[in-house]
Image (spheres, grey):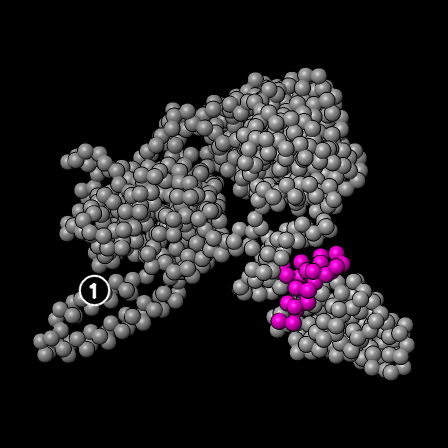
């Protein structure tokens, strides 16, 4: 026999199918067809055998028919004309005395999925709905759904819909369930199948006749019905009550979901139903299927939010076995943490301690994290275990323990003394960035209690040039500055070396800007630095795990029996890989004065004369001289919710096309359709109050030509050779350091490069009381193509000027010459175009903001070069 993947194989099969001797022998003919199917399943293109296989379907052998139909359904779309030859055979088989043949013909007639065959399929499907065999009716019902998917825009035949509704009372339960599925698909645009009182009662009475998946489907559809009286409600609940104890977990989950939906106004009934499903859920946790066990554990976590003691006496059922996969072990440990009480805490901690040395690194770290969460309520016992684990001197265990201790002192400050004593020598074992960040945070916050803290930091500072983790560098800066405030004599020299390296040699903008921030803070004085860095050391408001109030069932009832509980895994077990707690300052400063280096007078040095600016204002007043500007400060704006951000971002530019909007990075919002959301790259964005959002909307109206509003619109070019080429996050951080917030930005290296930003300015002038304004801005860089276009326009203006000189001799072109020269200078300008809108008008504040923005852009451009 020739090689399986060669063309000779197809030729050999074609000769065999066309051989009269083979066709006369039914067994040899069937085996040849079987070889064709085997070759097709192995990836070889056998579409050249389509005509021979069409002839082979005319047989009384049911096995041969099935094999041929598999081939025809696979290649029908490639041979639509030849597929018409099969229709006569299929229609003939639809009238065969054997119901298996009739159902097989109907199924494959709809599986051909050719729009040209629809007219030939409708009549057999209509007849199949009234067939005396249940297997034929099952296929015919689903065939109408397939037919509707094939032509979704076609009109729905009311007679077919009525026939499907009448088949809901079919004696075969599978036909009933198939009718529900078909009607749901056909009537999708009209809201799906209608479930009224007679249909609900009929389905409930027939529920026991359905199989497992049929019961789940029926219970899912019944959730749409709302009982009309309390008596009807309790009658339905009485019918459903036995299913709560079903041995099949899917049926139990679907029944409980329906219970919770119907009893949303009866919390006592809901809690009683939750208690009844305790046994089936525990049985599902011991299922042989790993997927079933994992799903049961996820849903048990939901139930414990409302009934914390539901599984308290069965906590040993959640002990991990050796052969279980890591993801199930981690879920079980999360459940164990919720079940801890005074009676079982010793046994649970002893069990978790054994998991800390598991061969799987993730399992060991999850166990250490679980011990840390229990430590919120039993800190002494847990600290003893964690301290003992440090003695093992294993890298991944030490890293997880240090991170857990960091999280523990954040919620339990009384543990800080024991934690500080246990940190000695940990720096020699830690290698991963997360563990080192946790150690640095502890040394920075509690450095006065650790005798060797300066020496540990000195080791990190000496190796900062070889450090690859930006998070470790940032945490090292904060820790060194904090430790300097409490132990200046030991830390001053190393802090100076660290700041010098980060400011002069560091290439990452975020680390460099953080070092500059601390340097400027220290220049302001120790007390000012202490106010910023010495905030709260802990957050006891997070509370303990034991004795938490139970949540109402309504908060999670909608997500029960869905995929949502399976996704909620990072929040519970993520403390072992989390970041350092963010420090909170004791005095919030809503407005921060800018340093002297960001003086508005700098605008004269960075901007290229008056011809590079275009003023579009309702007022004819000119911008004042920069030397007369009063001190200016930029203030952070309050937060903007995703719902408010979406319409704001979409209205930033009235001329913004969908193609220009696609690369913009916007916050996730329900206001965006999936088609609009797909090309967007997501990012964090700030927030606005409703009043400021309304003000921004007013600015947009100004940009569209509204009259009578006190506003100003300014366009300037910043002479940058290129836009900031770093990451968008670096630009965002750089702007936030001077309290300028970014609304949206394009990804790096995208042309045209755009950034939308805003801020509020506080301006104090001697001649008027202090006031603030709102500024909305756009940064635009068109790239090399824009430069070439600018050169072409400049050359065109030169030619126009030559023409105008000739016109001037005739006395016609003096004014046109001046205007053309001005426009040519504007259009030939290269750099980042800055467009600003301000309301209410404040020219001094606008020029000051423009100076600050220009300084940031020039700084980032010089860094990128």
Quadrant location of the N terminus in the rendered image: bottom right
Identify the residue shown where x is 57% and y is 44%.
196
Kindly tell me whether residue 825 is visible in this rendering: yes
Q: Is residue 689 left or right of residue 483?
A: left
Q: Is residue 442 left or right of residue 212?
A: left
Q: Quadrant of residue 300?
A: top right
Quadrant location of the C terminus in the rendered image: bottom left
Identify the residue shown where x is 80% and y is 35%.
322
Q: Is residue 15 left or right of residue 793?
A: right
Is 685 or 426 nearer to us in this picture?
A: 685
The furthest residue to the left = 811
For the stretch drawn in magenta, the main secondary structure is helix
Expressed as whole percent of the image width and height from the top left, the position of residue 738 reads 36, 40
According to the picture, the residue beneath numbered tag 1 turns out to be: 822
Identify the residue shown where x is 68% and y is 35%.
239
Mark count: 1
* Chain part drawn in magenta: 119-145
Residue 526 included in the magenta stretch of the image = no
Expressed as whole percent of the image width and height from the top left, the position of residue 347 reads 74, 21
Q: Is residue 527 left or right of residue 403?
A: left
Expressed as whole percent of the image width and height from the top left, the position of residue 721 reads 37, 58
Local SS, label 1: helix
Q: Quadrant of residue 614?
A: bottom left
Question: Would you place residue 743 above or below residue 783 in this image?
Answer: above
Question: Would you place residue 32 above or below residue 762 in this image?
Answer: below
Give the class, few, some or many, for how many residues have Cα within 10 Å of label 1's Cα (few <14, many ≥20): few
Expressed as whole percent of the image width and height from the top left, the position of residue 283 reads 76, 33
Is 649 or 587 nearer to us in this picture?
A: 649
Is 307 or 710 nearer to us in this picture?
A: 307
Kindly tell me whether residue 326 is visible in this rendering: no
Is 114 or 173 nearer to us in this picture?
A: 173
Identify the residue shown where x is 66% and y is 64%.
126
């Amino acid at each position: 026999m020739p090689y399986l993947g060669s063309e000779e194989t197809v030729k050999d099969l074609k000769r065999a199918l066309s051989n009269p001797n083979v066709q006369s022998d039914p067994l040899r003919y069937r085996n040849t067809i079987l070889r064709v199917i085997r070759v097709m399943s192995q990836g070889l293109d056998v579409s050249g055998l389509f005509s021979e296989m069409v002839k082979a379907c005319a047989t009384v052998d049911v096995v041969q028919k099935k094999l041929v139909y598999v081939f025809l359904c696979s290649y029908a779309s490639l041979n639509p004309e030849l597929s018409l030859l099969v229709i006569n055979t299929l229609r003939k088989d639809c009238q065969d005395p054997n119901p298996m043949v009739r159902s097989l013909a109907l199924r494959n007639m709809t599986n051909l999925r050719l729009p040209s065959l629809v007219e030939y399929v409708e009549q057999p499907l209509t007849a199949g709905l009234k067939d005396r065999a249940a297997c034929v009716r099952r296929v015919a019902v689903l065939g109408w759904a397939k037919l509707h998917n094939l032509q979704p825009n076609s009109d729905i035949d009311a007679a077919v819909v009525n026939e499907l509704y009448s088949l809901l009372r079919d004696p075969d339960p599978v036909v009933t369930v198939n009718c529900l599925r078909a009607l749901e698909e056909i009537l999708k645009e009209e809201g799906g199948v209608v479930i009224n009182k007679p249909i609900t009662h009929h389905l409930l009475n027939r529920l026991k006749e359905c199989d497992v998946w049929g019961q789940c489907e029926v219970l899912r559809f019944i959730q749409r019905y709302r009982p009309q009286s309390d008596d009807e409600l309790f009658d339905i609940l009485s019918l459903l009550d036995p299913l709560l104890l079903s041995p099949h977990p899917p049926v139990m989950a679907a029944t409980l979901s329906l219970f919770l939906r119907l009893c949303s106004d009866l919390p006592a009934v809901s809690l009683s139903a939750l208690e009844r499903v305790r046994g089936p859920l525990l049985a599902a946790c011991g299922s042989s299927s790993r997927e079933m066990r994992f799903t049961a554990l996820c849903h048990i976590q939901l139930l414990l939010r409302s009934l914390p003691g539901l599984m308290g006496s069965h906590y040993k059922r959640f002990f991990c076995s050796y052969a279980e996969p890591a993801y199930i072990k981690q879920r079980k440990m999360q459940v164990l943490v919720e079940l801890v009480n005074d009676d079982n805490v010793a046994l649970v901690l002893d069990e978790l301690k054994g998991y800390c040395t598991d061969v799987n690194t993730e399992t060991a770290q999850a166990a250490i994290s679980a011990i840390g969460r229990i430590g919120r309520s039993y800190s002494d016992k847990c600290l003893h275990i964690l301290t003992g684990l440090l003695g093992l001197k294993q890298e991944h265990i030490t890293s997880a323990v240090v991170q857990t201790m960091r999280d523990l002192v954040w919620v339990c400050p009384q543990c800080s003394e024991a934690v500080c004593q246990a940190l000695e020598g940990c720096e020699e074992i830690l290698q991963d960035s997360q563990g080192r960040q946790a150690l640095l945070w502890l040394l920075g916050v509690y450095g006065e209690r650790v005798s060797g803290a300066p020496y540990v930091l000195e080791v990190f500072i000496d190796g900062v040039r070889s450090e690859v983790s930006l998070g470790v560098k940032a945490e090292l800066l904060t820790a060194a500055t904090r430790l300097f405030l409490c132990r200046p004599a030991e830390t001053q020299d190393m802090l100076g070396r660290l700041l010098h390296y980060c400011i002069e040699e560091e290439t990452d903008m975020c680390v460099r800007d953080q070092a500059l921030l601390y340097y400027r803070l220290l220049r302001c004085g120790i007390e000012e630095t202490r106010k910023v860095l010495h905030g709260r050391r802990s957050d006891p408001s997070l509370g303990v795990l034991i004795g938490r109030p139970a949540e109402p069932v309504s908060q999670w009832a909608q997500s029960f029996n869905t995929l949502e509980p399976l996704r909620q895994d990072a929040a519970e077990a993520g403390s072992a890989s989390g970041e350092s707690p963010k420090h909170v300052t004791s005095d919030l400063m809503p407005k921060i004065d800018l340093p002297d280096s960001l003086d508005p007078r700098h605008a004269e040095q960075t901007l290229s004369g008056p011809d590079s600016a275009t003023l579009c204002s309702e007022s004819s007043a000119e911008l004042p001289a920069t030397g007369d500007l009063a001190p200016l400060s930029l203030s952070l704006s309050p937060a903007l919710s995703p719902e408010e951000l979406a319409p704001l971002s979409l209205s930033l530019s009235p001329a913004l096309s969908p193609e220009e909007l696609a690369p913009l990075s916007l916050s996730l919002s329900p206001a965006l359709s999936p088609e609009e959301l797909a090309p967007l790259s997501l990012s964090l964005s700030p927030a606005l109050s409703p009043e400021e959002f309304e003000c921004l909307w007013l600015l947009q109206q100004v940009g569209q030509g509204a009259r009578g509003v006190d506003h100003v619109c300014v366009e300037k070019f910043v002479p940058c050779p290129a836009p900031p080429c770093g990451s968008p996050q670096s630009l965002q951080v750089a702007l936030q350091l001077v309290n300028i917030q970014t609304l949206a930005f394009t990804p790096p290296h995208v042309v045209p490069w755009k950034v939308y930003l805003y801020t509020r300015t506080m301006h104090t002038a001697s001649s008027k009381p202090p006031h603030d304004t709102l500024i909305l801005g756009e940064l635009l860089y068109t790239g090399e193509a824009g430069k070439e276009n600018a050169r072409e326009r400049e050359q065109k203006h030169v030619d126009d000027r030559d023409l105008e000189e000739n016109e001037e001799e005739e006395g016609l072109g003096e004014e046109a010459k001046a205007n053309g020269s001005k426009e040519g200078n504007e259009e030939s300008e290269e750099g980042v175009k800055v467009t600003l809108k301000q309301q209410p008008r404040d020219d001094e504040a606008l020029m000051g903001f423009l100076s600050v923005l220009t300084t940031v852009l020039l700084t980032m451009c010089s860094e990128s070069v």
